[in-house]
Amino acid sequence: MDQPRIGTGSLQGVIQPIESVEDTGLNFGFITDLIIKVMYFTGYITGFEVADRVKLPFPGVVDGALEFLKREKMCEVRGTGGIGEGSYQYAITSKGTAKAQEVLERSTYAGPAPVTLQDYSRVIRAQGIRQLSVGPDVMRNALSQLVLNDRTLDCIGPAVNSGKSLFLYGPPGNGKTTIGEAIGEMILGEEMMMPYAVIVDGMVIKTYDEVNHELVEKASVIPGSGTHRRFPDPRWIRVKRPSIMSGGELTLKTLDLIWNETTRFYEAPNQMKANGGMLLIDDFGRQLVRPRDLLNRWIVPLEKRVDYLTLHTGQKIEIPFEVLVIFATNMDPKDLVDEAFLRRIPHKIEAVDPTLDEFREIFRRVCGALGIPFEEEGLRYLLQEHYVKANRKLRAVHPRDIVSQLLDLAAYFDVEPCLSKELLDRAAHAYFVEL
C-alpha cells in the first residue's frame, strides 16, 4: 500500500552547524545572560550540563561564555567530574546572583537558546505542508475507521494534497471532527525540524510545546540527508508534524503572541505551533467572538501564506503560515461567512447523513468493537420504532452512542448485553431528546 509522502527535502545547507557564537545568530550578551540564569536556578553544574540546558555546543560557544563569566567573577570553578573543561563544576557567585536577578527582571526564560526569526522562517518554509502527497489507498487506510462513500473520500484527498484550507460542514454527529483527526494522524506520520524557541529583538517566543508536539528523539538526524551523524544545531529538534485542535476557546487574542507579564517571554499562538502541520478549528461558529471576525483574521494567512503577529511593544513581525487549516462546523456555511471568504477556502466538503446501508455497516462495526453480537432483527426494530416512526434522521454517531447506552443498561440490570427490544428501547429513550 502506498504511504503518505511529505517531501521535507534535505535540510543540509538550510540548518548550519554551530562552531562559534556568530553561527548562532545570537548576541554574546544574550548567551551569557541565559547561562547565568541557568546557573542561578541549578546551583552546581558542569560545563557540559550547561551546554545541554541551553542546547549550544560547549566548544566554541559555551566554553567562551563560561570563561567570560568566570573572568567577571560571576561564577567560579568548585571542582571537576572528569577530564577537560566541560567537566568542571561551576557555581554562581554573589556577584553572579545579583546579575542573574537583574536579568530575570527582564525575562525569566532559562531554557534552550532560541533561533533567529530569519532562520526559523527559512527552515519552516523548506518543510512546507504543501509538499504533502497522498493517494486514494492512503486516504482509504487513514479513514478506514469511518464508513464514508467514495465521493466524500475523493474530495478529502485532493484537499489534503493542496495544503490549503478545508471547510467541513454538515449536521452534528457525522464524523467531521473524526475526519479532521484522521487527516492529522496522516500528518503525524511524518517528521520535521522545529526550534525550541525563536528570538525577536531580544525577546523570546517559546514555540516547542510538550502537549502539542511529539518529540521523536533528542539527538536528531537531518531528514532526507541520508546520514546518521548527530544534527549540527541542537536548538532544532525532530518532532512529528503537529496536529493541533482548537475549539470554543478560540478568540482573536489567542491568535496572537501570548505575552506573560510574570515570566516576561512569549508563548507562540496555535497557528505558529502548528506550522508544518495541521490546525483543526472544531465547532467553528460556536466561539465567543463573531465568526466573521475570526475569518477576517485568517484572510491574509490563507491567501499569502504569511501571518503577522504583534509584540506587546506594538511591533509587528512576519512569520510563515505553512499550515493546513480545517474548519469544521455544524452550522450552515451561508450563516457564517460570505461568498468572498468561501472563495478563499478552495475545498468545501459536506459530511452528509449516512444512507441506510452505511448506517447498518457502522452499527455492525460498533457491535463488533464493543463485543455485542450483531443481530439484523434488532437493528430493524430500532430503525422502525425509533427512526421511521419518530421521523428521525440517521446520524453516523448514533450506533456508537446507542450501543454504549445499551452496555450501561446491561451492566446495571446484570444481564447479557444484546440487541433485545427491551434494551434497545431503554437505550433509545435515554439517548434521544426531542427538541
Image: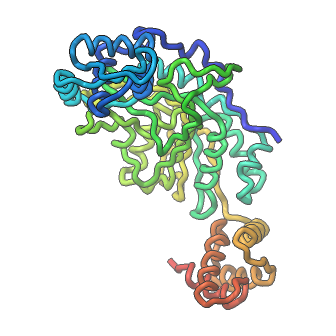
x and y, in percent, of residue 374 in the image? 78, 77
Residue furthest to the right:
1
Q: Quick one: quadrant of the N terminus?
A: top right
Locate residue 379: give its quadrant. bottom right
> In terms of depth relative to the viewer, which is nearer, 378 or 114?
114
**Total number of numbered labels?**
0
Nearer to me, 41 or 86? 86
Residue visible at 63% across and 61% down in the picture = 174
Report whether 178 appears left or right of 280.
right
Q: Residue at x 67, y 22 (%)?
A: 228
Query: Residue at the spot x=36%, y=54% of the render?
Result: 288
Q: Is 371 drawn above or below residue 4 in the view shown?
A: below
Percent position of residue 71, x then y: 25, 10
Depth order, front residue of 245/199: 199
Left or right for 395, reference 288: right
Q: Quadrant of residue 97?
A: top left
Q: Is residue 114 visible?
A: no
Left or right side of 152 for 164: left
> In the rendering, at what x and y percent does residue 250 appear?
41, 48
Examine the rendered structure and indicate whether residue 359 appears above or below residue 374: above
Q: Quadrant of residue 259?
A: top left
Residue 69 at x, y percent in the picture: 27, 15
